[in-house]
Image (tube, helix red, strand yellow):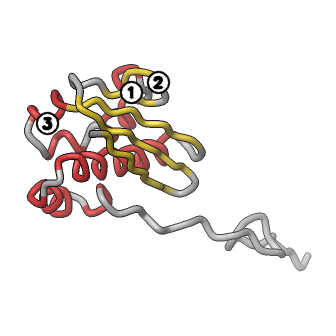
């Protein structure tokens, strides 16, 4: 059985494919062990810290990520992987364990950056003025 899921964070979009396998996890066609920086790799592998080790050995996961920065991509991939595992196993206890651990494993973060406005260099900052 093949399961397709997705995750988002800011402008990063991750699509994960979960299938029966031997425990291979690939991010953009490269093994997850080659992912840099290490903090991003640990974030992507976080869904496996909550579940038992046997689950990781039973599935192959292919993740395609585009857009955003390094940590945004890691957050998106983490959500896609966790959703894929829940959907693949069809296990309510796993879903509840993820929700108790961290809700953002299964629910996308809906926050977006505020648009830039006139009168300043950014969304909120204004140009300085001097009276002398």
Inter-mark Cα distance, 2 to 1: 5 Å
Left or right position of 97 against 75: left
- Sequence-wise, the earlier of marks 1 and 3 is 1
Inter-mark Cα distance, 3 to 2: 21 Å
Dot 1, crowdedness within 10 Å: few (<14), some or many (≥20)?
A: some
Tell me the element at label 2.
Answer: loop
Left or right position of 88 against 33: left
Dot 3, crowdedness within 10 Å: few (<14), some or many (≥20)?
A: few
**Residue 100: horizontal and vertical position, in percent?**
15, 63
Tell me the element at label 3.
Answer: helix
- Sequence-wise, the earlier of marks 3 and 2 is 2
Q: Is residue 68 above or below residue 113?
A: above
Tell me the element at label 1.
Answer: strand
Q: Is residue 132 above or below residue 91?
A: below
Q: Which mark is residue 26?
A: 1
Query: Looking at the image, which is closer to me, 54 or 44?
Result: 54
From the image, tell me which residue sits under label 3: 55
Left or right position of 58 against 15: left
Left or right position of 81 against 70: left
From the image, tell me which residue sits under label 2: 29
Which residue is at 91% across, 76% downward? 132
Q: Residue furthest right?
A: 132
Q: Is residue 130 above or below residue 51?
A: below
**Residue 127: horizontal and vertical position, in percent?**
81, 70
Query: Looking at the image, which is closer to me, 106 or 38?
Result: 106
**Residue 119: horizontal and vertical position, in percent?**
83, 75
Inter-mark Cα distance, 1 to 3: 16 Å
Q: Are marks 2 and 1 in contact (CB under 8 Å)?
A: yes
Which residue is at 47% across, 55% downward? 8
């Amino acid at each position: 059985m093949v399961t397709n899921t997705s995750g988002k964070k800011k402008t990063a979009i991750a699509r994960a494919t979960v299938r029966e396998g031997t425990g291979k996890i690939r991010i953009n066609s490269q093994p997850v062990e080659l992912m840099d920086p290490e903090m991003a790799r640990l974030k992507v592998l976080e869904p496996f810290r909550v579940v038992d080790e046997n689950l990781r050995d039973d599935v192959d996961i292919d993740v395609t990520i585009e857009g955003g920065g390094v940590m945004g991509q890691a957050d998106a991939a983490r959500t896609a992987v966790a959703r894929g595992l829940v959907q693949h196993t069809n296990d309510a206890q796993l879903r509840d364990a993820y929700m108790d651990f961290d809700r953002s494993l299964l629910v996308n973060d809906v926050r977006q950056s505020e648009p830039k406005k006139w009168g300043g260099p950014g969304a909120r900052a204004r140009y300085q003025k001097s009276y002398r």
